[in-house]
Image (cartoon, rainbow, N blue to C red):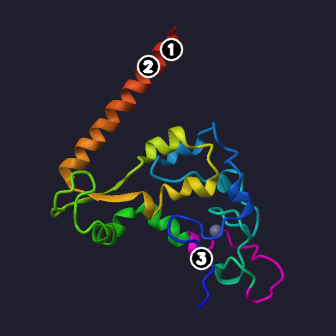
Amino acid sequence: MHIHCVQIGSPARSPPRARRPWAGAGARPEIKAGFRLPPQPFRAEGAAPGRCVVCGQPVFRLGWHEDLWGAGAPNARAAWHSACVAAWRFWLAPQGARKIVARVQRHRCALTDKRLLKGAEIDHRTPLHEVWRDLRDRPYAELLSYWGLGNLQVVNAPAHAAKSAAEAAARASLRAAARLSDAA
Ligand SMILES: [Zn+2]
């Protein structure tokens, strides 16, 4: 079957709208939803009828990216592609990929190279905090790839805790530096 789907974590076909930088960069209304969610520029713009709130492309019959049935127009009642819904669920719950990623890593911890232990956790190589902070002006499709498989690794729980603590400390010192420069 010919599937026109969004590959998990990275749109297989980059629509023209997704290649431009995300116009919402700078404003952060949707950060309220949490940094674990990717930006939602098309939702923020207000979804047009028949357009997908995830990728911005028209949604045709049965949630497909293409008009396979020759309907001639998008389905005005649809707001999601089936494939985009699947991708969205994956972005929200990447721990489901733990087994696959562990196999790719030959069951070694990505941080310590020690054997993966029971209770090993999925982690984003480039932390999503950093993506939100530093990479927001990248084209949307590229930005989404940080939520995809390519940015996932499996790590042992103690190593994960240490990495998270180091990242939190780095964020805190950045905030402190920003406060100092604001005060100056
Ligand atoms: Zn879509």
Q: Position of residue 116 (x, y in %)?
A: 19, 62
What's the magenta region? 68-84
Q: Is residue 1 magenta?
A: no
Predominant SS along the magenta part: loop
Residue 175 relative to residue 115: left or right = right
> Which amino acid does the dot numbered 2 rest on?
Ala
Residue drawn at the location 82% of the way across and 78% of the way down:
73
Please tell me which of labels 3 and 2 falls first in the chain: 3
Q: Is residue 163 above or below residue 45?
A: above
Please tell me which of labels 1 and 3 falls first in the chain: 3
Instruction: Determine which residue is flagged by label 1.
Output: 181
Instruction: Determine which residue is flagged by label 3.
Output: 5
Residue drawn at the location 50% of the way across and 69% of the way down:
8
Rendered image quadrant of residue 141: bottom right
Instruction: Determine which residue is flagged by label 2.
Output: 177
Q: Quadrant of ligand 1?
A: bottom right
Residue 90 relative to residue 85: left or right = left
